[in-house]
Image (cartoon, helix red, strand yellow):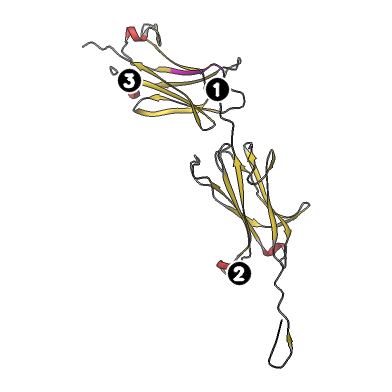
């Protein structure tokens, strides 16, 4: 308060009440910012409005953006989303129309943050944000155990005989001119763990990658086939296989295959 030259008392202008909000996220169970989180394949988030201050529901726009961590293995950074607020039975909120998805927006076992904001589009760019928050998703997974696995390859010769590695292939050293089939077998994969397998010819072509399949007994396997244009007839090459789980390398194996091609 103060006095003007005429002696009249001047009253300080009252600032508009601030916008108050908080971010809510669910992935099966509620996710709390900064706390250890076990995520499913989906993550739902919403900006819940505690107080609009001097604004009305239609005055503000909500925005959410996933920011991967510095060591993220996502193929590309997700795009942000934005939209109008809605007055729902749970109160005023900005809610995702579709959930964040594992391997598209986040990795189950990698921490990331979600940036949230409420903006007033009628204001200048440097004054649009009326509320913002950073939500830390501390996602982490228990490291899977090392695996007991094996790598085997087989080839059916023109006379119908089957040649195997390990096995008679090291002695026979056949000329390969058709399909070579190779399999990674995992004897006791852990339940609930998603294993990623890579199987290929060392230094040649692109490895075949995919998820580990499981038979009726619970054992895991992954099959890949290679043709002569990849492994090259009458050459020596190495079949290489790896198994990862939870972002951790759990097993790696190699098979050296020789061909005997007399002139």
Q: Which residues are magenta?
A: 182-189
Residue drawn at the location 36% of the way across and 6% of the way down: 159
* Quarter of image, res 41: top right
Task: Work out whether mark 1 precedes mark 2 in sequence or the reverse, and give the earlier one.
Answer: 2
Residue corresponding to mark 1: 213
- Residue 109 x/y as whole percent: 57, 36
Residue 262 in the image: above or below residue 88: above
Tell me if I can see residue 124 in this picture.
yes
- Residue 98 x/y as whole percent: 64, 45
Task: Work out whether mark 3 precedes mark 2 in sequence or the reverse, and give the earlier one.
Answer: 2
Which quadrant: the C terminus? Answer: top left
- Specify the principal SS of the magenta part: strand
Q: Is residue 165 left or right of residue 246?
A: left
Residue 8 in the image: above or below residue 197: below
Which quadrant: the N terminus? Answer: bottom right
Disc number placed over residue 123 in the picture, else none: 2
Q: Is residue 185 magenta?
A: yes
Residue 193 in the image: above or below residue 68: above
Q: Do the CB atoms of the residues marked 1 and 2 lie less than 8 Å apart?
A: no
Cα distance, mark 1 to mark 2? Answer: 55 Å
Residue corresponding to mark 3: 237
């Amino acid at each position: 308060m103060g006095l003007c030259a005429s002696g009249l008392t001047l009253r300080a202008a009252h600032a508009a009440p601030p916008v108050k909000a908080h971010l809510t996220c669910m992935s099966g169970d509620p996710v709390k910012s900064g706390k250890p989180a076990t995520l499913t394949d989906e993550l739902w988030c919403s900006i819940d409005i505690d107080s609009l201050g001097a604004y009305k529901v239609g005055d503000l726009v909500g925005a959410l953006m996933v920011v991967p961590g510095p060591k993220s293995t996502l193929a590309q950074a997700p795009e942000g989303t934005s939209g109008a607020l809605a007055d729902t039975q749970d109160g005023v909120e900005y809610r995702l129309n579709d959930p964040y998805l594992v391997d598209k927006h986040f990795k189950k076992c990698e921490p990331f943050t979600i940036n949230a904001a409420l903006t007033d589009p009628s204001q200048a760019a440097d004054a649009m944000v009326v509320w913002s928050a950073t939500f830390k998703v501390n996602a982490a997974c228990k490291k899977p155990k090392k695996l007991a696995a094996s790598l085997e390859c087989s080839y059916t010769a023109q006379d119908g005989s089957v040649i195997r590695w390990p096995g008679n292939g090291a002695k026979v050293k056949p000329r390969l001119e058709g399909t070579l089939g190779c399999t990674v077998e995992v004897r006791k994969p852990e339940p609930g763990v998603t294993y990623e397998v890579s199987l290929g010819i060392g230094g040649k072509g692109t490895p075949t990658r995919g998820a580990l399949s499981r038979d009726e007994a619970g054992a895991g396997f992954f099959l890949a086939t290679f043709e002569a244009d990849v492994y090259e007839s009458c050459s020596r090459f190495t079949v290489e296989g790896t198994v990862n789980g939870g972002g951790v390398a759990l097993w790696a194996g190699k098979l050296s295959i020789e061909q005997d091609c007399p002139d």
